Amino acid sequence: MNEIKKFENEKKERFSSYNDNKDLNLSANKFMNQTLENKYSYNFSWLGRPIIQYPQDIVAFQEIIWEVKPDLIIETGIAHGGSLILSASMLTLLEATGEIETGRVLGIDIDIRSHNREAIEKHPLSSKITMFEGSSIDSDMIKKVKEFAKQGKKILISLDSNHTHDHVLAELNAYADLVSVGSYCIVFDTVIEDMPENSFPDRPWDKGNNAKTAVWEFLKSNNNFEIDKSIENKLLITVAPDGYLKRVK
């Protein structure tokens, strides 16, 4: 067995054991609950743009992109644009190493604030990014995205906009079929289901009405995807439990 394969096997054995480690999981859950209350995910940036994600999920996203080698990444939810820049930077690396020919990123948001749009368009990686403004579940937008997606040979999708059950389920039904076999549809903020009720008093989502309940509902009638539990087991700390969906057929 070569050293790389040995390392990978050791890694899998290690994080597979985490499920049975109650103290480790309690510590991770405590960290998540306390840091979510204190907006920990707002503390980070990627190549100069704020990226409202946990570092663990950023690393996982990077690993997935390198493994899958998509040439098109579609993201719903733009905010400050940090995630778009992350995707663009990874596709640039894939191009530079000859893994893909041309990489593109498409971001969709119902309200792209002018200062964010300006900052994204001025970024050195902006040439890789296209932005559509409008609701991701509007029928005209879905048609527009699907037309754009014809440029991609291998597609990865990230859903991180409105986190209500109905909205996320509509996004999954609209876009999941664009995901290439072996690639992922990553549904962020499924952690809402695991938090105490009324944790988001100023938001329309809550326990029982969120991205995770949408994922569960979607998977009842779609067997093309499976939850990749190995990712959240490895991370321990993630805003996307049950949200790393791998297309298996």
Image: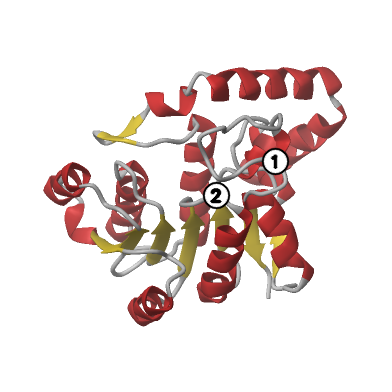
Q: Amino acid at mark 1?
A: Lys
Identify which residue is drawn at 63% across, 24% down: 32
Residue at 15% over, 51% down? 121
Contact between labelled residues 1 and 2, with CB atoms less than 8 Å apart: no
Q: Is residue 32 above or below residue 56?
A: above
| Residue ranking furthest to the right | 20
Q: Position of residue 44 (x, y in %)?
A: 37, 27
Q: Residues within 10 Å of mark 1 (few under 14, many from 20)?
A: many
Badge 2 marks a residue whose secondary structure is loop
Of 100 and 26, which appears nearest the observer?
26
- Picture coordinates of residue 46 (x, y %)? 32, 36
Residue 55 drawn above or below residue 114: above
- Compared across the picture, whether 91 is left or right of 16 comes to left
Q: Which residue occupies 41% across, 58% down?
A: 75
57 left or right, relative to 240: left
- Position of the C terminus, as image quadrant, is bottom right
Gap between marks 2 and 1 measured at Cα: 11 Å
Left or right? Give the position of 172 relative to 81: right
Numbered tag placed on residue 189 in the rendering: none
Q: Residue at x 38, y 76 (%)?
A: 149
Q: Amino acid at mark 2?
A: His
Can residue 7 be seen from the camera position used here? no
Q: Quadrant of residue 138?
A: bottom left
Residue 127 location (% of width, % of height): 17, 59
Sooner in the amino-acid sequence: mark 2 or mark 1: 2
- Residue situated in front as seen by the camera: 125 or 15: 125
Q: Mark 2 sits on what residue?
A: 163
Quadrant of the rendered structure where residue 245 is? bottom right
* Disc 1: which residue: 207
Q: Observer-nearest residue: 238 or 104?
A: 238
Count of residue discs: 2
